[in-house]
Image (cartoon, rainbow, N blue to C red):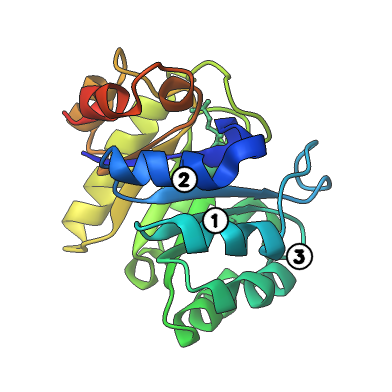
């Protein structure tokens, strides 16, 4: 299992040392939640702060857009060269076009599914994607409880990816902890995002290690 701590739960008063600490503790990716106050009822950080995160991070960035204007935000964040850039399918009229745009920057494209969104909605896009991000909470806030139906959705998505002979990774985001990570692994998840669980623990390394199933 690969681990991507969500910096939404970090102490923003000492962001630089928080980012260094999770990278030193052995995370695989640094998950950055970008919220615009429109697609979700919360507002987070823009390219100035994410640029500082990129500078402090010794691991690649995984940027999760929760915004209305995906093309605008893609152009804004592309110069920071994240490894993954994911956008919500619920908010995009031309996902195939946007995927090509993300690829043109040399960034791996990913699509995010809200809890109610069926995996079949991206069936004809799967072969274009490096990752699918499955939300296991309603997007907008850290520290929420894991929605159990996520497991069923991941199982279906795993079958779709495997039967098409694809290498697309599955990432799950929201309410992940040491109690549910094994079930996620069994369902076919490759990467877990964890915010509250990691940043709320006294040892980032032990928390990350406990998710490494
Ligand atoms: C929610 C964000 C998540 C969130 C995860 O909208 O996408 O990345 O920070 O936080 P936890 O692990 O606390 O649920
Ligand atoms: Zn996220």
CB under 8 Å between callouts 1 and 2?
yes
Secondary element type, mark 3: loop
Q: Position of residue 195 (x, y in %)?
A: 49, 30
Nearer to the camera, 10 or 115? 10
* Dot 3 or dot 2, earlier in sequence: 2
Q: Which of 87/62 is in front? A: 62
Q: Which mark is residue 161?
A: none
Left or right: 79 in relation to 147:
right
Q: Is residue 144 shown to the viewer in this render?
A: yes
User: Can you say whether 151 is above or below 165 in the image?
Assistant: above
In the rendering, which numbered label is found on residue 19? 2
Give left or right: position of 133 versus 76.
left
Closer to the chain start, of discs 3 and 1, is 1
Residue 171 can be seen in this image: no
Which residue in the protein does label 1 denote? 53
- The residue furthest bottom is 104
């Amino acid at each position: 299992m690969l681990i991507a701590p969500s910096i939404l739960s970090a102490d923003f008063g000492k962001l630089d040392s928080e980012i260094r600490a999770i990278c030193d503790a052995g995370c695989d990716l640094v998950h950055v939640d970008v919220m615009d106050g429109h697609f979700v009822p919360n507002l987070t950080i823009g390219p100035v702060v994410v640029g500082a995160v990129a500078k402090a991070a010794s691991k690649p960035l995984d940027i999760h857009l929760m915004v209305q204007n995906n093309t605008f935000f893609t152009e804004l964040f592309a110069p920071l060269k994240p490894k993954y850039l994911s956008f919500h399918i619920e908010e995009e009229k031309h996902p195939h076009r946007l995927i090509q745009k993300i690829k043109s920057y040399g960034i791996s494209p990913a699509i995010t599914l809200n809890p109610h969104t069926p995996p079949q909605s991206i069936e004809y896009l799967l072969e274009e994607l490096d990752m699918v991000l499955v939300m296991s909470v309603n997007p907008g806030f850290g520290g929420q409880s894991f929605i159990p139906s996520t497991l069923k959705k991941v199982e279906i998505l795993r079958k779709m990816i495997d039967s098409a002979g694809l290498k697309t990774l599955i990432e799950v985001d929201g309410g992940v902890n040491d109690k549910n990570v094994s079930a996620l692994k069994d369902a076919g998840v490759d990467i877990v995002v964890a915010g509250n669980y990691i940043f709320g623990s006294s040892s980032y390394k032990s928390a990350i290690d406990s998710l490494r199933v």
